[in-house]
Amino acid sequence: MTNFLIRRFVQGLLVLFVSSILVFLLLYLAPGGPLSQTIVEKRQNARFPIKQEDIDRLMKQYDLDLPLWQSYTRWAFGWPNLPDRPIRYGVIRGDFGTSWRIAPNEQTMKVILRVLPNTLKLTISSVLLSLIVGVSVGIYSAVHQYSKMDYTITAATFFGTAMPVFWLGTMMILLFSFKFKEWGLPYLPPGSVNGARDYIVPVLGTIQANSLSDQFLRLIMPTITLSLLFMAGWSRYTRSSMLEVLRQDYIRTARAKGLREKLVIYRHALRNALIPLVTIVTLNLPFIFGGAVITETIFNWHGMGLVFINSLFQSDWPVAMTYILILSALTVASNLLADVLYTLVDPRIRVS
Amino acid sequence: MSQKKINLILALLVTASLVLTACGNTPAAPAATAEPAATQSPVAATEAPATGPTLADTIIVGAWQEPGTFYDPAVTQAIAVEVELIFRPRFVIRQNYGYAPNPALVEGDLPSLDNGGAVLNDVTVKAGEPYFDTATYVVQPAAADMQLKQLVVTAHLKPELKWDDGQPLTAHDLVFAWKVNCDPTGTQAVDITYCPFESVPGASGILSNFEATDDTTLVATYIPGALDATYFLTPYGLYGILPEHLFSGMTAAEIEVDERATGSENTMPLGFGPYKMDSWVKGDTITFAPNPNWTGATPATPTVIYKFYSDSTSLAAAVIAGEIDATAGQTGLAVDQAPYMKSVASRGIINYSVDLNTASFEMLYFNYYDPTDTTFSTPDPVLSEFCVRKAISLALDRQKMVDTIYYGESSVVQQPQLPQMISYDESLGILTYDPELAKKTLDDCGWAVGADGIREKNGVKASTNYLTTSGNAVRLKASQVLQSSLKDIGIDVKLTYVPSSVAFSKDGLYGRNFNMMQFANSFSVTDPGTWFFGVANCGQIPLPTNAFSGSNYAGWCDQAASDAAADAAYLTLDTAKRKAGWATVLKAYFSEGDPAKFETGGIPVIPLYTRPNYLATSPLLSGVALDPTEYITWNVETWTLEKP
């Protein structure tokens, strides 16, 4: 086991190194760049139009005038230090660089960590809701296989899987925010982590901005939107896993012993049926920390996904690279964790 | 009824309501000229409510972008300026190109040659000292002693102005910001136009000095020989303002990373307006409270909050849902949201208006030369001919562009300048739409229609390339209309989209690496001096030999127009003489020039359409007014919001 872990750890480091090169190359070789917006903004100013010498000066500031390999090594390893340029320590020593546009001169890690709590709030609530509903529905479907409800759930899960998040999110805003408010029904705020001022919701009364109730109301729509996809997938996993387990001899034995059906299902079948789900949930670790780009954008949920998309739109490469690297590290870690957990929850499996 | 059936019915109901919501509310296809009348600029501020309604104590404005910094020399984002106006109002109010002194900050009138605020002194420039060369229009050291006129502009601030920390705000703070911008250690400043000659490597600015002679008096001294039609703006904060009492003794490099200059969640940047910045929750809101040190009128609403959204869609949702009270401008609503927002406005949920009289228009620039010849000495086989450019101008259905892109809510620009410009005169000519005349024009100059429908002349196909920025839905649609319009007259156009950093680089506009290129310009002043100089002056043609400096990207060189544009821009401040000069430029613009010299032919650029500005507000909000030269926050202290 120890050898396995060491081997996987070293492999993980290699994957991260290659990822860093790919991420860097992808961004630096992509058309556009951090000066795009500055140039457009300044170009439209007839009194102070930007000049080529201004552009050259800014290119130097961002190390964009250096050969690609040198830009990479300065970013990744803090080498070489060059005269007339700021000293860099490199990602390897925890210096991910500073933001170019989103929060100029601020450490990218600080920019990202600032929104981590918002992301965790959304993703953890979504994962919990998906687990509770997905597993329950999956069990029900398996136990009542080929019943009308099973067919209905199956259809609903296909609907949930197929439905684009951006469409569902927009429709939910139209219905639960606009229409419900127009109809005088209790409505939900259309987005944001918290409100900027108090508002009145029919039945519920005055909701104070940034209060717990405000935050809860704002969490409902993004959580449901994000959960539907997971619910659908996880309920299918649970259903098929349960069906497989329910056909096992030890389940038949348990029933033959005269155990109550609930005990058979929840004590004997479910525990074994959930083993594959452990892996699947563990592999979602990057998502939990990485956020949901589309959902966060639709609901103006200021989390890591939104910061990432903003960094791409504004060509803030240091922030984008930090985000992707963090996600790469989490992906490597979650794969390793999934391997370990699998051996722990299922003693039949041994790493060879 | 069994639980199963109840569950089934509930599930069906939710699904049906979602589908109905998706199907409902689809706005009818907009008629090009129908629907709520677009407000003409200057959009009159809605009158404040009479006595009666209770006013809210907070107004929330939304935007889909957040300012990155409030360090003035580095501010390029429109949203940063929009937000900054709340706590750092302008010294010169721009309202609809009006340019009036802000009575709360400025003493007396704006400086002019008439009132003695600006003077032209006779000075001797000694050999080696910088002067503005009226032959080359650049600042350079004098070869020998010479006598020249020197423009000196003096301005006065109100006495006893204060920053919101209670410290005195003086003329020295404006001078300090200028010095910081021109400090070569700075990396954030993106502009060196008005820095002293060689103060920053590459700087050939036209100011020799900017000083505060006392706490309220500012004196801007131009390089001898240099004239500047907008000199009356120069002393009032060319590069913004910095509190010297905080940053004295620090270099630009140190200041630009100091949170007291940039602003942060822990440190609010200082201001001096009706409001002061109270808090900044990054990624969420910036909150403003009344500034106790403001000597102007007390703000009508105690708290103003700027709330930031992920995109224009979530912003639209917020204004419809009443989460915010206003959104406008470049970081407000998008063009394609117009039909839906109008349908919402028609139900009284929001107020929605469009300002057509904006200060920005899109244009199509031609390159007279073949960009594949790096010496720029080979005429472009197609676009160097005046008749081709004339035919293109006749064939372009610019009204269709307006209808397709802006749902009819924009205006076609008839001359290579905005109608607000002091030089605008339709009697000198306008561009018209006449595709039949376009075909005849091409026929007459030998471009015959080929078998494939594309015209040919001397074995050359009428085929060219169009370049513009990628990721811009508006320009994408415009390019498609252009391609289709030109195909109808037998000109084949290949469309290319590149990122703005490429489009506006030596690989694009700045290296004249294009045949036809679309981009936009904004004009905050009605004086077209520098604009026409850039378009028409022969010395402004970017070439490898001058390191591609200048902005005559077409390579248009009609000597009479060139001289007239230069005279109007740099050699006189007499308005009548300048207007006569611009008339010469405009006449040349519409004329063929010398048929033997292709470079003298006009129409180097075709103006397309203005870029409208959208405003969506709560019906309960009063006082908001769109202005072509200003951001909506210019009069924020007068806004009021009724309580529901």
Image: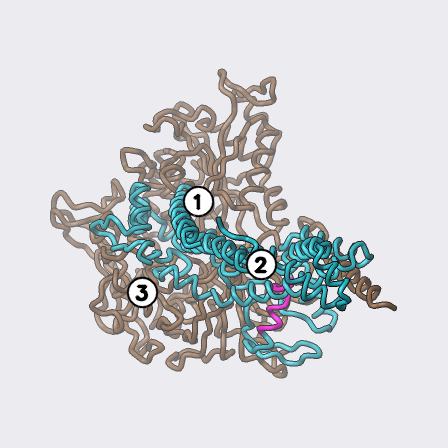
Chain colours: A cyan, B brown
Can the viewer see residue B526?
no
Give the overall secondary structure of the magenta segment.
Answer: helix
Have a look at marks 2 and 1 and say if they share a chain: no
Q: Which chain carries label 2?
A: A
Read off the magenta span. A215-224
| Residue at left offset 34%, top offset 28% | B374
Q: Gap in Å between the C-alphas at discs 2 and 1?
A: 47 Å
Q: Mark 3 points at which residue?
A: B115
x and y, in percent, of residue B271 in the image: 37, 72
Q: Residue B173 carries which label?
A: none
Q: Which mark is residue A278?
A: 2
x and y, in percent, of residue A341 in the image: 52, 58
Q: Name the residue under label 1.
A: B500
> Which element is circle 2 on?
helix
**Dot 2 amino acid type:** Val
Does the segment drawn in magenta span residue A218? yes
| Residue at left offset 40%, top offset 51% | A3
Task: From this view, report whether residue A277 is shown above or below residue A198.
Answer: above
Q: Which of marks 2 and 3 is in front?
A: 2
Have a look at marks 2 and 3 and say if they share a chain: no
x and y, in percent, of residue B93 in the image: 42, 66
Give the position of the N terminus of chain B as an image quadrant: bottom right
Does the segment drawn in magenta span residue B493? no
Have a look at marks 1 and 3 and say if they share a chain: yes
> Which comes before the other along the chain, label 1 or label 3?
3
Q: Which of marks 2 and 1 is in front?
A: 2
Question: Label 3 near label 2: C-beta < 8 Å?
Answer: no
> Which element is circle 3 on?
loop
| Residue at left offset 16%, top offset 46% | B141
Task: From this view, report whether residue A233 is shown above or below residue B381.
Answer: below
Question: Label 1 near label 2: C-beta < 8 Å?
Answer: no
x and y, in percent, of residue A210 in the image: 54, 76
